[in-house]
Image (tube, rainbow, N blue to C red):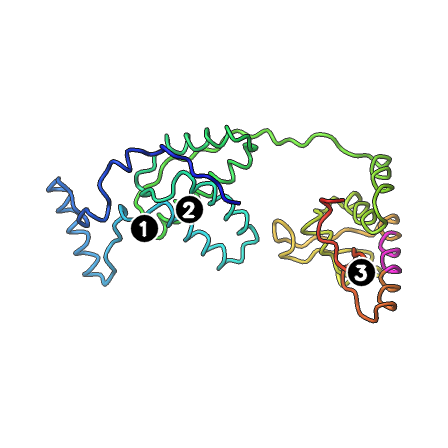
Amino acid sequence: MCLPPWTGLLAEVERCPREDSLPLLGSPDRAVAENALREELKRRADGLAASPDPRRTLVDDLPTALKDRYRVEGRRSLERLEDAVEQLLRMFRGVPATRVKGADVLRYANLRLEEKPQPATINRELAALRAAYRLGLDNDTIVAMPRIRLLPENNARQGFADVKQVAAICRRLSPDLADAVQFMFITGWRSRSEVLPLRWPQVDLAGGFVRLEPGTTKNSEGRAFPLIPELRALLERRQSITRRCERAQGRIIAHVFHRYGRPIKTLRRA
């Protein structure tokens, strides 16, 4: 989605001379310049590379490094980070990282609130900005960061469905979707990342457990749920449906929840 940039922000940056027109380590203060020179000579004597000029680092550069780290570490939240960065750069694109102050971050939060997203969404964006700055400090590409405070959240979940309500919902769904909803209601597992991708090797009918492997859950820890009678009956029904589909199609179907052998990816439209 193409988002219009906010205009008229950080006007003092546009009025200032370009950073690349300033000399490296330049300072009108003789003592500061001499200290900087001594530090650079020491780095060279130690065989280290020259210090990067923090004035040349843009805000754009910080989340780029953060996304690279997410890719290296195999983080599953990379897509969420990219969405947050897209919003952040509407205000901070092309701005030197050292020019951003706490007041600018607060203004960003206020502008986002005017667009009516949830405070939790804005906090994910501010947290991404904070993480990007901290990584910049770790990588020695910047020497300071603004104070970034998150908004208060009131995300307490309210309202719970009881057995009768879930049964009423399931009566309006196809049998395959109804089984997935019943499984989620019994186990409390997440639909998109834990239940819908569930495969038969994770179901141990003989041992009496259904398992999530380490690395597949939100906290990357494995999890197991005992096959209480209603859950066992549901999985045995799914197994019978799967076997019939396999015989009809002449192939193995790995997913527990599927539509005629095709994996169910989301419940949103249902």
Q: Which residues are magenta?
A: 234-241
Alpha carbon separation for disc pair 3 and 2:
43 Å
Instruction: Name the spot of residue 56 as percent of width and height, x first.
Output: 27, 48
Residue appearing at x 86%, y 39% in the figure:
167
Q: Which circle marks residue 254 in the picture?
A: none
Label 2, label 1: how far apart the Cα atoms are: 11 Å
| Within-10-Å neighbours for mark 3: few <14, some 14–19, many 20+ | some
Q: Is residue 240 magenta?
A: yes
Percent x, y of residue 20: 23, 49
Mark 3 vs mark 2, foreground winner is 2
What residue sits right under mark 1 in the picture? Answer: 141
In the image, residue 171 sits, relative to residue 72, either above or below, namely above
Q: Is residue 64 left or right of residue 190?
A: left
Residue placed most toward the observer, 253 or 173 = 173
Q: Between 145 and 251, which is closer to the camera in this rendering?
A: 251
> Predominant secondary structure in magenta?
helix
Q: Identify the amino acid type marked 3.
A: Asp
Cα gap from disc 3 to disc 1, whole angstroms: 51 Å
Residue in the picture at 35% in, 53% down: 139
Residue that carries the numbered disc 3 in the rendered image: 204
Residue 126 in picture, x, y percent from top left: 46, 38
Dividing the picture into quarters, in which one does residue 270 lie? top right
The residue under the point 18% across, 61% down is 45
Question: For the residue labelled by badge 2, is the local secondary structure a helix, a strand or a loop?
Answer: helix
Q: Residues within 10 Å of mark 1 (few under 14, many from 20)?
A: many
